[in-house]
Image (cartoon, rainbow, N blue to C red):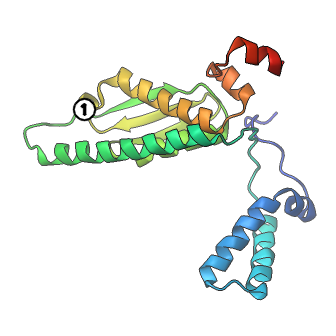
Amino acid sequence: MSLHRRRRALASGWFARVTTQWRTILWLTAVWVMLWGDLSWGNVLAGVVIGSAVITFFPLPSIAARGKLRPWPFLVLVGRFVSDLVVASFQVSLLALNPRHTPRGAVVGVRLRNPSDIYLTITAELSSLVPGSIVVEAHRLTGMLYLHVLDVETAGGVEQVRQDTLALEARVLRALASNDELRAAGLYHVEPAREAAEA
């Protein structure tokens, strides 16, 4: 039995990989055309061939994701991320310019609500991109993130770091997760009449 229970088995054979990962091939083709800066049939064909070769010779395991993109929660996620980025940048700058204050760093463990690889990765990346904290370890089987915080006092304390990380995960899930995943995480809130209609 594999330790990585949440990963689907990789499609066997080059034809199966190419047909099941056609979106990746399209993305690689678009990147190829942009790199050349010329939209022509030759570049598109070369991009498809190279994308297919990458999928065939350098296969990555598939990650199960049943989510759906919700535009308004996605805009909230992006807007809050940009806001956090600006605020944290000023806080770290002030911290660096204040010689009288010695930052007290800490490593904080946070158990996420959803164990999916994709949401754990997105939450970890967004946490690391905000100045003042970086994910030093992510344990995928338990859904634990370990963040190093530059200054616990500026961040509001260890418990506040945990709450902020869980709030970030909640925004990620509301923007990208399916209704079933939101229910499992305790984040799916809907009026009783609408829930009865959906049932």
Q: Is residue 101 visible?
A: yes
Query: In this image, 171 relative to 64: left or right?
Result: left
Q: Residue furthest left?
A: 100
Image quarter of residue 67: top right
Count of numbered tags: 1
Q: Residue 21 at x, y = what percent?
A: 81, 58
195 shown above or below 20: above
What x and y, as percent, mark residue 65? 74, 41
Coordinates of residue 142 in the picture (x, y in percent): 61, 27
Q: Which residue is mark 1?
A: 154
Query: Which residue is pictured at 54% across the width and 38% down the height?
Result: 138
Q: Residue at 56% x, 27% y: name it.
A: 112
Query: Nearest the camera: 167 or 114?
Result: 167
Left or right, residue 56 beside residue 27: right
Q: Is residue 143 above or below residue 57?
A: above
Q: Secondary structure at mark 1?
A: helix
Residue at image location 89% in from the left, 64% down from the top: 14
Dot 1 alpha-carbon crowd within 10 angstroms: few under 14, some 14 to 19, many 20 or more: some
Q: Residue at x 61, y 32 (%)?
A: 174
Using the rendered image of the protein, determine whether residue 58 is visible from the camera's viewpoint: no
Circle 1: residue type = Thr
Picture coordinates of residue 90, whole percent (x, y) = 24, 46
